[in-house]
Amino acid sequence: MSRSERLLDLIQILRRHRRPVSGHMLAGEMGVSIRTLYRDIATLQGQGAPIEGEAGLGYVLKPGFMLPPLMFTDEEIEAIVLGSRWVAKQPDKRLAAAATDALAKIAAVLPDDLREDLDATTLLVGPQSGSVEAIDLGVVRQAIRDERKLGFLYRDADGAASQRLVWPFALGFFDKVRVMVAWCEMRQDFRHFRADRMTDLTATDIRYPRRRQAMLKEWRATLDKPGQKIAKDTAG
C-alpha cells in the first residue's frame, strides 16, 4: 500500500469513530507501527485535516471534514495523467492546452511523494491519428454549454452538402474522429455529425427551446434502436 492510500484509509477509519480512538488501536487496524501512525496523523494535520487529540489520549476527526481533493491513490493519479495526456493530443487546441495546464496546476500543489508518482507514471498515449477538423471545436463546446443553436455546412459520406441548423448537446471523442450529437431542425430528429465533415461553422445567440440534459437522456434511450450508434455517420 502506498503512503497516499494509507493516509486515505486513516481518514476513513477516523470518520467511523465519533469518540477519540487510541493511537495503538488505529495502528493495529491499519497494520502499521505506532511511530508510522503518529507521522501519518501529523501529515494529515499539516494538510488541514481537523484531527484533534494527542498521543496517549486518542484522536478524533471533527465532523464535516471533506476529504482533500488533492489526495489521490496510485490508480487515481494514473487515470488523471493518462486522461490529461490523451486530451492534450486531441485536435481541439484549447481543450488540449487546458488539459496540460490543469495537470501542471495539480502537480504544483501535490505533496512531494505524490508529485513524484505523477512524473513517474509509465502509462503513455500513442501518436494522434485520424482526420483533422476545419472547425474550432471550442465553438461547439461553448454552444453546448450555453444551449445555443449552431449553423454549418455538412457533407455526408457521398460528398453531398446541406446547410444545417442544430441544437448541439454532446460531443464524442473517438480515436479517429470527433462526433457532435444534436437535434437537427431539418431532419426533426437526433443526428450525429462528424466534425471533419463540417465547415462554415456559425455560432448563434439563439437559445434552443429544450434543456441539453433532457435531450441527452432522450437520445441515450434511442441508442438501443437498430442503426442508432454514435460512431455511425447518420447525419443524412
Image: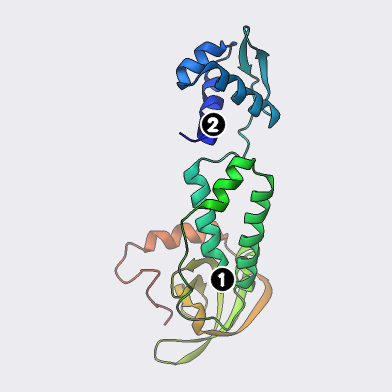
Q: Which residue is mark 2?
A: 8
Taking 27 as reference, is 84 above or below it? below
| Depth check, front residue: 202 or 102 | 102
| Depth check, front residue: 204 or 210 | 204
* Residue 230 sits in quarter: bottom left
- Where residue 178 sits: x, y (%)? 49, 73
- The amino acid on which the numbered mark 1 sits, given as a three-letter code, is Trp
Taking 170 as reference, is 162 above or below it? below
Q: Please give left or right for residue 91 compared with residue 230 in the image.
A: right
Q: Is residue 188 visible?
A: no
- Where residue 212 sits: x, y (%)? 56, 61
- Cα separation, mark 1 vs mark 2, equals 43 Å
Residue at 64%, 28% (x, y): give it. 43
- Where residue 27 sits: x, y (%)? 51, 17
Helix, strand or loop for disc 2: helix
Q: Which residue is mark 1?
A: 167
Q: Is residue 23 visible?
A: yes
Q: Earlier in the sequence, mark 1 or mark 2?
A: 2
- The amino acid on which the numbered mark 2 sits, given as a three-letter code, is Leu
Looking at this rendering, what residue extends furthest in the top direction? 56
Looking at this rendering, what residue extends furthest in the left direction? 226
